[in-house]
Amino acid sequence: MNIALLGFGVVCGGVYDILKNMPEYNVKKILIRNPAKLTMDCMTLDFADIENDSEIDLVVEAIGGLHPAREYILAALNAKKHVVTANKAVVAAYFDEFVAAAKENGVKFMVEATSGGGIPWIKNLQRVGRIDKVTKLHGIMNGTSNFILSAMTCEGKDFSDVLKTAQELGYAEADPSADIDGDDVRNKCAISAAIAFDTKVDVNSIMQAGIRHITKADIDWFKENGLVCKLFATAVCDKDNFDAVVEPVLLGCDTVEANVPKNYNITCLYGETIGEVKLYGQGAGGLPTGNAIVQDIIDINTNNAFDISFGKEMNKAEIIRGKYYIRIPAGLENYTEFIGDITEKTFTLGDDTVVVTTETTPAKIHSLLDANKDKAVFVARYF
Ligand SMILES: NC(=O)c1ccc[n+]([C@@H]2O[C@H](COP(=O)([O-])OP(=O)(O)OC[C@H]3O[C@@H](n4cnc5c(N)ncnc54)[C@H](OP(=O)(O)O)[C@@H]3O)[C@@H](O)[C@H]2O)c1
């Protein structure tokens, strides 16, 4: 099988290293964008060299971002080449367009590496879906935020100190917002829900809250109360409706998810006959993510790839409910407008007020966050 790689960074570097030892797979061309990095004969600066090469069967896209990734993926599919991608942002935004183009051209579009890195998550969602309706999924799907929360919990450190360490270790970007504000998890949540529930999911309809405002005082209070905080993607479905949200959750300290260490990920699903399944592993990195891509390549080459169809018409509805821990900074007076009617108890934490709510919906809590975006309000749902 002749393969082209788009990009040659962390992920495509990992794919290249794995395929090097698999002679039946030939990396025929690699698209890069910087002429100074043209170090191999197979490298090109021109995507048309790949699009117009009829010997190339499959294109791996790992350049990241929305554009020109979207255009390259569509052009490759329309040139009747299979596409395997790790780019969660472009898939979350244009999943149905890619699936339709793949179908029209009789080729495969595969996304294992977008969600959960090396964890065989997407394939198992599809496999479980052959027998069961997947009714719920959740998971820790961002290694950077888990690294930060784990270090705060286990080592008692402040958020800013741990973020700095994560940046020094290369786990967090100089601009960490995609990881700590939940954007990255939201993309993975949208892709996972679309696969699990076999329906189109508008990524922008998924509410998100991150861990930017969590403090040592929050973590200390959670510990005193036998709780551990993790950033979760959660999605559920009920008949023709589904719901999904990305936000911090509070877990009992003896749960499997609470004990996921460092930058590891865990993904969990519930099926009617299989019950609960939890998959744990490396959610990122060149070789684990490269491994997920090569698994997709092998599945395509051996005719073992699942079709993605989005066969069900489903509506987004308010299904997820829970009690929330909300820490409100001193001076934020308007909070009772939003949560006065669902307050179960309040107490002070330093200068701040904490409200524990009665059971409610994410929409109710996120309306408070949206109205106070510039304030350091921290929320977490009791899971
Ligand atoms: N890193 C991970 O562990 C991981 C895990 C799962 C998914 N992903 C996803 O995989 C994708 C790639 O991530 P990565 O970590 O491999 O990124 P990366 O190390 O920054 O590599 C991206 C590569 O693409 C090249 N590139 C960017 N735009 C291009 C263009 N227009 N034309 C040609 N080449 C272009 C870059 O070239 P330059 O060197 O010139 O910048 C670089 O070689 C992202 O969507 C990411 O979200 C990453």
Image (cartoon, grey):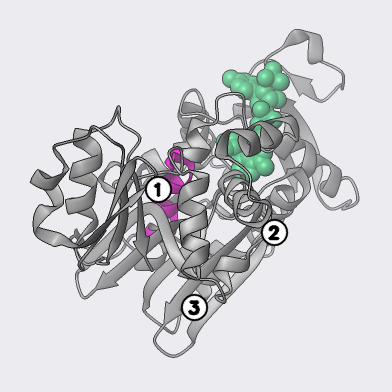
Going by the numbered disc 1, the residue's amino acid type is Glu
Give the total number of marks visible in the rendering: 3
Q: Is residue 183 magenta?
A: yes
Give the mark nearer the N terminus: 1 vs 3: 1
Judge: label 1 CB < 8 Å from ligand 1: no
Q: Residue at x 19, y 70 (%)?
A: 240
Q: Position of residue 258 (x, y in %)?
A: 56, 67
- Which residue appears farthest toward the top when viewing the image? 36
CA gap, disc 1 and disc 3: 26 Å
Give the mark nearer the N terminus: 2 vs 3: 3
Going by the numbered disc 3, the residue's amino acid type is Val
Q: Position of residue 229 (x, y in %)?
A: 49, 58
SS for dot 1: helix
Going by the numbered disc 2, the residue's amino acid type is Gln
SS for dot 3: helix
Q: Is residue 147 magenta?
A: no
Range shown magenta: 181-193
Note whether 13 is above or below 127 in the view shown: above
User: Which of the labelled discs sits on residue 128, or is there none?
Assistant: 3
The residue at which mark 2 appears reads as 295
The residue at which mark 1 appears reads as 104
Residue 297 seen from this side:
yes
